[in-house]
């Protein structure tokens, strides 16, 4: 990989991605189904956290899933094997230089990957090359600027800004969700539709408070504590106060909202 992947490849990060995928399956994947016999490329599959959901929802499609990390790809392969899935093949590859012929795929799916790339436009151009004319690209990204919560807390926002800044320094963009439409349009996709998918969590949804607010979002922010302090972005006391405030949003009178953006475009 030509840049640092800000979340790293630790077992705890793998668990976080699985929690995220499990908790958000309906929210993220509703509306995505690929026809029988179609060839689908999942680019940046990671540990396969989205792969099984994709396969379940399109039981007669064939998936080729690639990731630049051999370790993550091996974990994804083990997961698919354990689930008895036979419609998925995994390969290690860089999505900026994929070993497939032009027009090889009917559909491409990308989730939480563009935000980590220094060249998202170049990645979209490469993925477009691999699509047949009339094929579709589906992309899902977050946007940490689209986070709001109650009780509000400047310390929590400061801790979140540390994650955004570290990701920026690593060449990524944690605010990329809002840019999906221009990115897809500039890459030449037609009929681009981007829709927000908001996660809304309050005390009436304890499963989401645990699976999303705590185990996905707060876990991600916790994961950059040491790096943020080491980079001089924040005092440790303020970061910890921010974390405490984020945990407070999972209380009986708390609310937490985050918006993902899902875009679909057709290869012209
Ligand atoms: C946040 S993870 C998302 C994984 C999965 N799509 C999901 O939703 O759980 C981002 C993944 O993109 C992969 N990645 C980053 N740059 C890549 C590149 N140039 N080519 C292929 N994969 C890449 C990383 O190795 C990592 O597994």
Image (cartoon, rainbow, N blue to C red):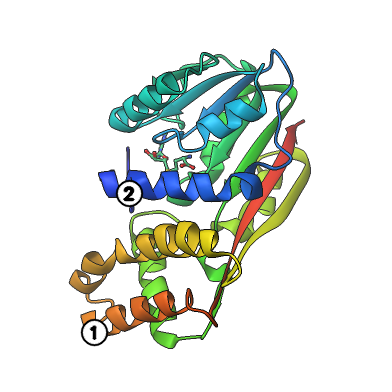
The answer to whether residue 155 is above or below residue 95 is: below
For label 2, the SS is: helix
- Which x, y percent locates residue 261? 64, 54
Tell me if I can see residue 183 in this picture: no
Disc on the earlier residue, 2 or 1: 2
Count neighbours of disc 2 (C-alpha within 10 A) and say few if under 14, some if 14 to 19, many if 20 or more.
some
Q: Residue at x 46, y 31 (%)?
A: 95
For label 1, the SS is: helix
Drawn side of residue 237 relative to residue 196, left or right: left
- Which x, y percent locates residue 33? 71, 30
Gap between marks 2 and 1 measured at Cα: 24 Å
Most extreme residue toward the left, as rendered? 230
Determine which residue is flagged by label 2. Answer: 13
Res 226 quadrant in image: bottom left
Where's the N terminus, which quadrant?
Answer: top left
Q: Residue at x 26, y 68 (%)?
A: 225
Determine which residue is flagged by label 1. Answer: 237
């Amino acid at each position: 990989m030509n840049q640092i992947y800000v979340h790293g490849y630790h077992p705890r990060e793998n668990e976080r991605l699985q929690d995220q995928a499990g908790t958000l399956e309906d929210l993220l994947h509703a509306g995505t189904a690929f026809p029988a016999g179609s060839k689908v490329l999942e680019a940046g599959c990671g540990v396969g956290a989205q792969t099984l959901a994709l396969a379940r929802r399109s039981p007669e499609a064939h998936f080729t899933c690639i990731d630049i990390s051999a370790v993550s790809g091996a974990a994804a392969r083990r997961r698919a094997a354990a689930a008895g899935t036979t419609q998925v093949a995994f390969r290690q590859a860089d999505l900026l230089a994929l070993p497939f012929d032009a027009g090889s795929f009917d559909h491409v799916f990308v989730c939480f990957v563009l935000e980590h790339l220094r060249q998202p436009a170049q990645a979209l151009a490469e993925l477009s090359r691999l699509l047949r004319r009339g094929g579709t690209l589906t992309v899902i990204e977050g946007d940490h600027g689209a986070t709001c919560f109650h009780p509000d807390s400047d310390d929590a926002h400061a801790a979140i800004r540390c994650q955004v800044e570290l990701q920026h320094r690593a060449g990524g963009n944690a605010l990329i969700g809002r840019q999906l439409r221009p990115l897809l349009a500039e890459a030449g996709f037609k009929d681009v539709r981007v829709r927000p998918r908001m996660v809304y969590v309050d005390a009436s949804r304890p499963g989401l408070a645990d699976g999303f607010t705590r185990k996905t979002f707060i876990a991600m922010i916790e994961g950059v504590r040491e790096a943020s302090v080491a980079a001089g972005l924040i005092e440790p006391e303020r970061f910890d106060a921010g974390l405490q405030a984020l945990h407070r949003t999972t209380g009986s009178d708390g609310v937490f909202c985050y918006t993902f953006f899902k875009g679909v475009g057709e290869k012209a």
